[in-house]
Amino acid sequence: MSRDMNQTRSDKFEKRRKSTKAITIGIIAASILVIILLGIWVFGGSGGKEQNANENENSSSDEDSDFLITEPDEEEEENNNSTDNEENGQDEQNNDNNEQENENEQNEDNEQNNNVETESVEPSDENVSDAYTGNWDPIGTEQEGPHTTTYDDGSQDRIEIKEATSMVTGIDADNMVEWLVENGGDQKVIATVSDKDETQTFRVYLQWVDGEGWQPTKVEELIENDKK
């Protein structure tokens, strides 16, 4: 009987010991799990913050890089615009200089031709009040190669004939009426012109000089406009 009681106590003690050991193991396991979870939370959160900080820093760096890239582009565009403006300004200046040179040359030619000594000659008909010749220079020309006179309005011949006629009559080209430009012989024309008020009417004889343009040879001032 005593042996059975001892056996029962031993079994109870063994069961209690096993239960205590299981509880202890469970507590230890739970503690380890809690520690792991805490570690994950602490280090994971810190890593997330670090990652966010890195991402923000990278984003900021990218924005700075974009700004730095954009700014030189704008500066380069301004420099290009400035260069283009300078080139355009230089082109305009060159054009102005060329126009001024041409105008000066034309004024010099006109002045030289205005200073040409003239000589009175016999009128060609009774409608001429005054006739004279002079050693005028050709007006100059933009035409090249073999020349054939073109009488059409707006042609290069008509433009240059008008300039030459204006030079020897003193009538400004803008104030001139060309009543008739007719054939006066081989490479020669006769232009009848007046001012717009018809206070003066002239008959101008011109001949073509190769490479130099139309050259006035004689001027007649008319009593009446016979081409009106």
Image (tube, rainbow, N blue to C red):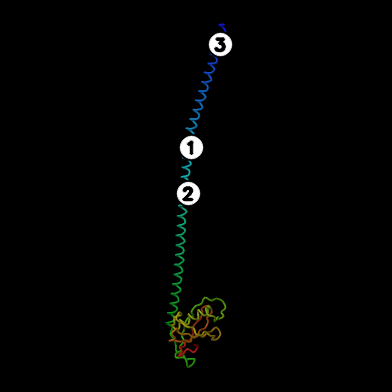
Residue 174 placement (x, y as % from top left): 45, 79
Lower position in the chain sequence, tag 2 or tag 3 = 3
At label 2, which amino acid type do we have?
Asp
Q: CA distance from mark 2 to mark 3?
A: 84 Å
Lower position in the chain sequence, tag 3 or tag 1 = 3
Q: Which residue is mark 2?
A: 66
Residue 32 to residue 58: above or below: above
Please give the label number shown on residue 34. none
Residue 129 to residue 10: above or below: below
Tell me the element at label 1.
Answer: helix
Disc nearest the viewer among 2 and 1: 1
Residue 132 placement (x, y as % from top left): 46, 88
Q: Which residue is mark 1?
A: 48
Q: Nearer the viewer, residue 176 or 142?
A: 176
Tell me the element at label 2.
Answer: helix
Residue 161 to residue 95: above or below: below
The crowding category of the residue bearing disc 3, from other C-alpha atoms within 10 Å (few below 14, some 14 to 19, many at least 20), is few
At label 1, which amino acid type do we have?
Gly
| The N terminus sits in image quarter | top right
Q: What residue is at 44 percent from the left and 79 percent from the top?
A: 110
Lower position in the chain sequence, tag 2 or tag 1 = 1
Q: Nearer the viewer, residue 188 or 57?
A: 57
Q: CA distance from mark 3 to mark 1?
A: 58 Å
Q: Which residue is mark 3?
A: 8
Residue 49 placement (x, y as % from top left): 47, 37
Asked if the residues shown at circle 2 and circle 1 are in contact, with their CB atoms under 8 angstroms apart, the answer is: no
At label 3, which amino acid type do we have?
Thr
Residue 118 placement (x, y as % from top left): 44, 86
Q: What residue is at 52 percent from the left and 23 percent from the top?
A: 26
